[in-house]
Every structure is written in C-alpha cells, then in structure tokens.
Image (cartoon, rainbow, N blue to C red):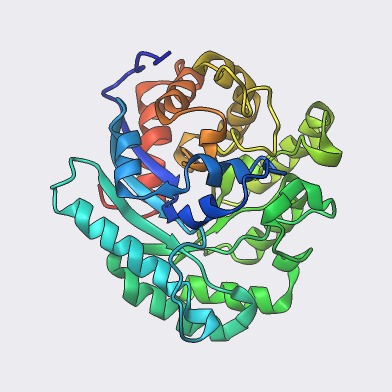
Amino acid sequence: MTEAIIDPDLSIIDPHHHLWDRRPLHHLPPNPPTHAFEHISHRKGLYLLDQLLEDTNSGHNIVATVFLECRSMYRADGPNELKPVGETEFVNGIAAMSASGVYGKTLVCAGIVGTAELLLGADVGRVLDAQMAAGGARFKGIRRSTSYDADTDVLGPLNRHAAGVMMEPKFREGFAQLGKRGLSFDAWLLEPQLPEVIDLARAFPGTPIVLDHVGTPLGLASYKGKLPERFGVWRENIRELAKSENVCVKLGGLAMPFCNFPSMLSDPRAPSTQLAQEWRPYIETCIEAFGPKRAMFESNFPVDELSCDYATLWNALKLIAKDATADDKHELFFGTANRFYQLGL
C-alpha cells in the first residue's frame, strides 16, 4: 500500500545516493543470492537518471541530491589510479542533464563525491586534481571506503579492504591532500572501527569529514542479536567523535543488511512507523551528540531499497523528526547538507 506523504512541502537535499548500470549481472545463472547485498543487483541492476527521478518525484520535495561513489562507469583504459575519474565524468554528465531543467525541478547530482586511493600517499594529489577537473564545481570530495571486519560474512561481496587502513601512514599522507584542495571526506566504516575515525578526525581538524550511515551498527553474521549489547559502545564512540567540530553525520543507511532489523527484506514491506521505531534510537542519539547543524538525513538509495521504497523512507525519517522545531527540521533535511557540500542553495 502506498503511504500518504508526510509534510510534502518540506525542502530536502538528499546527500547520499548512487547511480549505476549493473545489468550484466542479470545474465548470471539464477542462483539464490548468498548475501543480502546481492539482492540489490537482482532487484534493481539499473539505477540511472530515470530511476532516480522516479524516486525523487514520488511525493517528497527533493530540491537537490549529492552523488556518492559506487565503483560505477570506471574508465576501461589508462592507469588504474585514474580509472575512477570515469565515474565522475559520467555523473557530471547526468548533473548537466538535470541542470537543463528538462527533467524537472530537482537538481540531481548538484554535488559529486568520487573516490581516490589514499594509500598512494602524496601522489594521490594528481588523482584528486583529475577528479576536480572532471567534476568542476560539482566535485566536493571523496569517499574511500575503509569498511572491514574479521568476520568476512559481515561484508560479504563488499570485502575489499584491509584492517586498520585509516591508521596507515600512507593513507594519512594521502588524506592530507584533501585539506589542501578544500575537499571533504565521506567515511564509510563499520561500528567497531569508530575509534579509528575518531583518531583520524583529531589528526586532521581542518578537513571536513562526514560519518556515513550513523557508523554502520552491526547485527548480522557473528554480530547477530548483539545490537542491544553493542549499543552503549556505539553511543559512546558517537559522542566522542562528535567532539571533533570538523565532523558531521549522515542519518540513514539503517535499511542495509548490517543492522539486520526485522524490516530487512520483509514481506510485506514494513511501513514507515515500523522503520521509524527501529531506527529512532540511533538517529536520535546522533542528533543529540552532533546537533541538527551537523547532522543530515540521507536516502542511501538504491541500497536502502532492501527495506523500503524511497517515499516510505523519507516518511520514516520525518516521523523521527516530527517533534523537532521548524529550524531544526530545516537543518536536518536541507541546511547541513547544503553547507557541508557547499551547494550554495
């Protein structure tokens, strides 16, 4: 059943979504997915401008969006370290299409967050320069995923990184290049890794960092059933991270498999009231720690489609924020993202 849209006039910047074309995966043998993330490719292998607009036009007032890297449309040729520039070129083209006004009022990909291999050390500067040239004023920063857990069943197909990468001297040598260029860093990691990003934020107080997905709490694989007992540790780390004024937090991503809430892949789909109940303790803790001016709601689409559709997701977030003041709602849904990504809206 389609839900009625809550507060449809509230202006929203969606600061975290992806674009990809993964249709070739549909030609694989029809074996059942072995990890929840594999449902994304089976359910929505194509997520480009038309699919995004279908979501952003589903009833909420989405004024603008920010694209986050997702290993899509890399260059086929050239040095490996420069292949991710192809993704920025692709997304900047989508943004130019949207900016024409032909596709409606939403400024799609008004900000672009690409990627670069920070383990290159200072040499990553030339990659960042190439990214900035490809994305122009829309290019705002990078995300270099650092997600890791010793239990490989936690990340499944997303197992790509070594332990402790944020503490590596070469990583930090590369990270220093961001501040020199006025670029930001999106930090995607798992809850047990929060002390590492706390240390990183203290080491680079002049570089804007945003913690993706409230720090990705874990409730699957060897962490199954452990959300309640780990909540206190997560909360203390969130409060500690919030002491670094250069850090903001994205409020979302809780529809992914990592938390393993009952709404994950549920049939029938969970309503916004259930989603709000499941997500509220994490989101309210983050707002309390960071304040509305350093917190931003996100969709994380199409990944969060594992639990709900786009309209229902924003309804759930609005239910969580329903008792906030008008000024605080503006910050959470629009203002913080606008400032952090320097969108000028």
Q: Is residue 195 above or below residue 293?
A: below
Of 291 and 7, the residue lying toward us = 7
Q: Position of residue 8 (x, y in %)?
A: 29, 21
Residue 212 on image: x %, y %: 57, 47
Image quadrant in which you'd find residue 55:
top left
Residue 22 in view, yes or no: no
Residue under the image location 35 percent in, 42 percent down? 52
Q: Quadrant of residue 146?
A: bottom right
Residue 190 visible in the picture: yes
Q: Is residue 291 above or below residue 187?
A: above
Q: Residue at x 67, y 62 (%)?
A: 200
The image quadrant where one finds the N terminus is: top left
Q: Nearer the viewer, residue 217 or 90?
A: 90
Percent x, y for residue 196? 73, 58
Q: Nearer the viewer, residue 23 or 29?
A: 29
Percent across and percent down for residue 232 are 79, 32
The answer to whether residue 31 is left or right of residue 110 is right
**Residue at 73% of width from left, 45% of height from top?**
191
Left or right placement of residue 218 versus residue 36 in this view: right
Q: Nearer the viewer, residue 343 or 245?
A: 343
Q: How many marks?
A: 0
